[in-house]
């Protein structure tokens, strides 16, 4: 195994121990020699792995105290690896619902602003991204890339200096959602039948300057995504909000 792969494997394994609370917050990780033996790697690999986890806010390294596990509130929650570990080793339902709630807080309002403020050239770029989604419906990876671009462009089109800074975050959230789709065996037929029509409604609402319809369509997209995630992540609290949002979308349309 290459040095790079050894490092990645060591990081994943130590992160697993932390997330599953084999080593709870406030406790010390084993000393270097013990980690080397447990992981089957050199001291250099162990040190680099701990350094990586320290950068993600999961451990702190102090002289004479060794490496101590930090409380979850210190973790870099928007780091894609940290999010993946939490989904893999914590209650996936709770993590996924937190993700959906964050999207609900941000995306509908941003879609409404985009409907009021998007320029013709921005609408044209969004339409191209939507067309790329349609063309890639049978290829989940390419579909995900086009989907991320579509939602990122909406954030940029809201012309709010603070919200536009969140565009990379939304890309990450959409990417995570698409990865959760993959676990359900999502296929081109379902994408064309369920996801694309809702994205089309959102695109139309932004182009025609209808903020209420854009907000309702954005909510419907997020709730549809939640429903399409793996069954283990489909929770009741989001489902109730989805039913209310669907009624709102029908009224807005």
Image: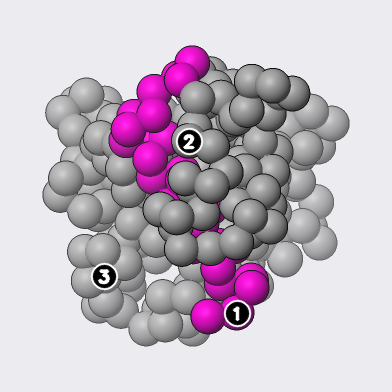
Left or right: 43 with respect to 242?
right
Q: Is residue 120 visible?
A: yes
Q: Earlier in the sequence, mark 2 or mark 3?
A: 2
Q: Earlier in the sequence, mark 1 or mark 3?
A: 1
**Magenta region, main secondary structure:** helix
Tag 2 and tag 3, C-beta contact below 8 Å: no
Check disc 3: other Cα within 10 Å, few if <14, some if 14-19, many if 20+: some
* Residue 18 part of the magenta segment: yes
- Residue numbers of the magenta segment: 1-27
Check disc 2: other Cα within 10 Å, few if <14, some if 14-19, many if 20+: some
Please name the residue shown 39% across and 23% down the image.
24
Q: Please say if 61 is above or below 122.
A: above
Q: Which residue is mark 1?
A: 2
Q: Which residue is mark 2?
A: 30
Please name the residue shown 41% across and 75% down the image.
140
Dot 2 falls on a residue whose secondary structure is loop
Q: Please say if 23 is above or below 231.
A: above
Return the mark for residue 14: none
State the CA–CA distance, disc 2 to disc 1: 24 Å
Q: Please say if 67 is above or below 41.
A: above
Please name the residue shown 46% across and 63% down the image.
40
Q: Which residue is mark 3?
A: 186
Q: Is residue 172 visible?
A: no
Q: Residue furthest right?
A: 161
Q: Nearer the viewer, residue 90 or 176?
A: 90
Please name the residue shown 26% across and 52% down the image.
229
Q: Nearer the viewer, residue 70 or 148?
A: 70
State the CA–CA distance, disc 1 to disc 3: 34 Å
Q: Nearer the viewer, mark 2 or mark 1?
A: 2
């Amino acid at each position: 195994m290459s040095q790079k792969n050894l490092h990645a494997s060591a990081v994943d394994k130590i992160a697993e121990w932390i997330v599953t609370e084999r080593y709870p917050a406030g406790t010390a990780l084993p000393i270097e020699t013990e980690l080397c033996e447990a992981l089957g790697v050199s001291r250099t690999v162990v040190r680099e792995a701990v350094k990586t986890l320290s950068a993600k806010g999961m451990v702190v390294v102090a002289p004479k105290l060794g490496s101590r596990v930090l409380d979850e509130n210190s973790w870099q929650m928007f780091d894609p690896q940290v999010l993946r570990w939490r989904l893999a080793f914590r209650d996936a339902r709770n993590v996924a619902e937190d993700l959906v709630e964050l999207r609900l807080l941000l995306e509908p309002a941003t879609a409404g602003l985009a409907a009021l403020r998007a320029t013709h050239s921005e609408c044209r770029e969004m339409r191209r991204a939507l067309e790329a989604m349609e063309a890639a419906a049978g290829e989940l990876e390419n579909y995900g890339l086009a989907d991320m671009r579509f939602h990122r462009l909406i954030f940029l089109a809201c012309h709010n200096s603070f919200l536009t800074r969140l565009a990379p975050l939304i890309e990450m959230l959409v990417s995570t959602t698409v990865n959760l789709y993959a676990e359900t065996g999502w296929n081109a037929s379902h994408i064309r039948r369920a996801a694309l029509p809702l994205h089309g409604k959102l695109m139309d609402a932004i182009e025609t300057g209808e903020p209420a319809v854009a907000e309702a369509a954005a909510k419907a997209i997020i709730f549809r995504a939640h429903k399409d995630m793996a069954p283990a992540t489909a929770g009741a609290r989001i489902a109730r909000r989805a039913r209310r949002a669907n009624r709102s979308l029908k009224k807005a349309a």
